[in-house]
Amino acid sequence: MLKDAIDFGQVRRALVVRLMFHGDVLLSTPVVSTLKKMVPHIDIDALVYHETRDMLSLHPDLNQVFTIDRNWKKQGVLFQLRQEWRLLSALRARHYDLVVILNDSNRATWLVKLLSPRWSVGPDNPGRGRLYRKTITHRFQLAHNRHMVELHLDALRCLGLTVDSSAAHARLSIVAGAEAEARVEHHLSAHSLQSGNFVLVHPGSRGLYKCWPEAKMARLIDALSGQGVRVVLSGSPAAAELEMLARIKAQLTHPVVDLSGQLSLKELAALVAKSALLIGVDSLPVHLASACQVPVVALFGPSLEQVWAPWRTPHQIVGATLPCRPCGLAGCGGSGQSDCMDKLSVQAVLDAVQSLRQTLEIAPQHHRAGCVSRIQLV
């Protein structure tokens, strides 16, 4: 047992803070579920950016989800200060005994300082000054080749909890909700699709340097369609991503169902959950598939798959063998174009799909729908 392990019997309420992007927030959910499972008497709240709140809303182990809207600053300094004060007042009223900081930032440091919990934990950042070291009572070490979920769980380990990352409660989790599920069911019914009889392809990413060349993505989709697989396309409503998907569709010789730009984040989660297989690049849908325990073929370029790979769901990773990969840069030399993605062949991705199918005993069904059956994973 750690000599500075905290007494969880004296922790009544905890705040988990993850101020990053959608996928990062989803990858923090095992911290919430593990903490609740291991210390069930604790009330747990979360603080995230407003645009990522749907990653946590409806989560059964969370009491409240507080948000910071990054658009506050666009409405003037006084408006922002009022909103920040209201948030701080609401957080103070919760009287947290423990604050778990999952990504280091100046805001997080001052938040802990102002909330004055008995215990706090955050990443050990040697570059931080005396204020951070005095404010954060416990600090967990960072490792560049450790999966992000494990890094998050390290925050609990260094508080004295014996965490088993293979346990059921350490999975990713998202609750789409009945409304989102009903809307997705309506979309699928309109195209004579059912749960588990289609492959979902999500070509885009917030970082376009992670994306595969459009011509190769089109050839992959046509190859799958030619095998009798029903393909559904998804994508965010971002203009650049919709334009990319339009160019991909223009190269197809087989019809697909295109739901890009039509789904909320909750609806995308519901759609992923109903798919037989997800094919995508390093982006949020890969993590949604992990949360829904849907098999994944993930295409990786500059990103380090040891950190961002699908978590505890059957998967195949396709990545080019280059001495410079992974570099973590936004394209070669920061150019926005990644040679390691350009060099991935269509056949390599098809082989990964076939390998995953064989592993899961998934095979095309040669009937009218030309669909793919999915084994229910446990």
Image (cartoon, helix red, strand yellow):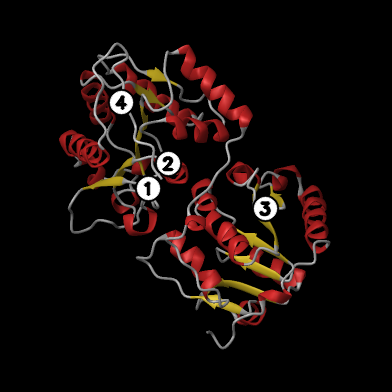
2 and 1 marks in contact (CB < 8 Å): yes
Say whether disc 2 or disc 3 marks the residue closer to the N-terminus.
Answer: 3
Quickly name the residue at label 4. 372
Query: In the structure shown, which secondary structural element does the residue marked by tag 4 occupy?
Result: loop
x, y percentage for residue 185? 52, 21
Say whether disc 2 or disc 4 marks the residue closer to the N-terminus.
Answer: 2
Quickly name the residue at label 2. 289
Quickly name the residue at label 3. 62
Quickly name the residue at label 1. 313
The quarter holding residue 356 reads top left
Residue 94's place in the image compared with 7, above or below, is above
Q: CA distance from mark 2 to mark 1?
A: 8 Å
In the foreground, 192 or 141: 192
Tag in front: 2 or 4 = 4
- Which residue type carries mark 1? Thr
- Which residue type carries mark 3? Leu
Query: In the structure shown, which secondary structural element does the residue marked by tag 3 occupy?
Result: loop
- Which residue type carries mark 2? Ala
**Image position of 54 (left or right of 327):** right
Q: CA distance from mark 2 to mark 3?
A: 21 Å
Say whether disc 3 or disc 1 marks the residue closer to the N-terminus.
Answer: 3
In the foreground, 179 or 367: 367
Query: In the structure shown, which secondary structural element does the residue marked by tag 2 occupy?
Result: helix
x, y percentage for residue 330? 36, 50
Would residue 252 be visible to someone looking at this image? yes
